[in-house]
Amino acid sequence: MCRMVAYHGSNRATLRELADCLVKAAEDDPLKGWSHPHGWGIVALTEDRLIHHRSSRPVFEPSERSTLINLVDSLSGRMMVIIHARKASDPSLVSSMYSHPYLESNDRELLYVAHNGSVNLSLGKEIGMAVEGVVDSELVARYLSMKGVNSVNELIPYTRTALNLLVLKIPRGVGSPLSRASLHYFNWANSNDPYYDLHVGKGYVMSSSLSKVGCRSLGQAEKGKLMELTPES
């Protein structure tokens, strides 16, 4: 289970506030009373930079929080950002290589995928991928790379708890990747547990817990509909 946030806009102060809320919710989730200690990651795209950083350490450790905030403070101009803090379903699979966002690429695009929830490992058969030593979220990322982001509803039958997704899509081409990129979110859960809700704000979408630790939202994201995150005005 995980906590995560995506931001699209040019206001670094907003992004820093969201990052601080993520750290707080990861350390002591107000909805569940547990921490998310099994690593964190960020992908950030600007006009001239693409940063992808993953760590196995808890994001709420002082040194890791400093790393996150330093990365946020280094960004400028319009940006698309995903930040994720992990609570592993299988504690034996904890390392930087298992931290989100995952990267998948094909001849059309690059996809950075962050996921909250769990899906059935039988999805591996659908995509021809062995599941030993594989995290279920990796299967989701591979499926979306193979089938396209618009196929996300086809993953609902494989979902065990939730299919909360943040996806940065960067089509291949010449010129600035930011000019072609898009940031998407998908909100789905097999229950009404508020822990699995995604909340939306102006230029951002976040796990519901963040709205309990200081980051306000405009409401719950619509369930079962792939949405593109529009920039903060």
Image (cartoon, helix red, strand yellow):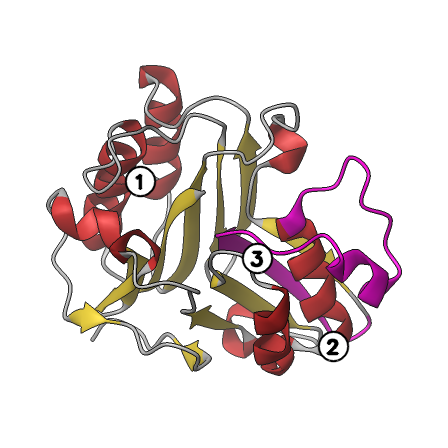
Q: Residue 151, image x and y in percent?
A: 64, 80
Is residue 113 one of those drawn in magenta?
yes
**Identity of the residue drawn at 48% across and 52% down:** 117
| Secondary structure of residue under mark 1 | helix
Q: Please tell me the numbered disc located at residue 209.
A: none
Q: Relative to 137, is 80 above or below?
A: below
Amino acid carrying mark 1 in the image: Asp
Where disc 3 sits, the SS reads strand
The residues bearing labels 2 and 3 have C-alpha atoms spaced at a distance of 14 Å
- The quarter of the rendered structure image containing the N terminus is top left
Q: Is residue 162 left or right of residue 196?
A: right
Residue for badge 3: 113
Tell me the CA gap for discs 1 and 2.
35 Å
In the depicted view, which residue is nearer to us: 154 or 100? 154
Q: Nearer the viewer, residue 99 or 194?
A: 194
**Dots 1 and 2: beta carbons under 8 Å?**
no
Residue at 42%, 24% in the rendered image:
58
Q: Secondary structure at mark 2?
A: helix
* Residue 83 x, y percent position in the rendering: 41, 47
- Name the image quarter holding residue 35: top left
Q: Nearer the viewer, residue 47 or 187?
A: 187
Indicate the quadrant containing the C terminus: top left, top right, bottom left or bottom right.
bottom left
Taking the spot 87% from the left edge, 48% from the top edge, the residue there is 130
Q: Which mark is residue 147?
A: 2
Q: Position of residue 138 (x, y in %)?
A: 68, 51
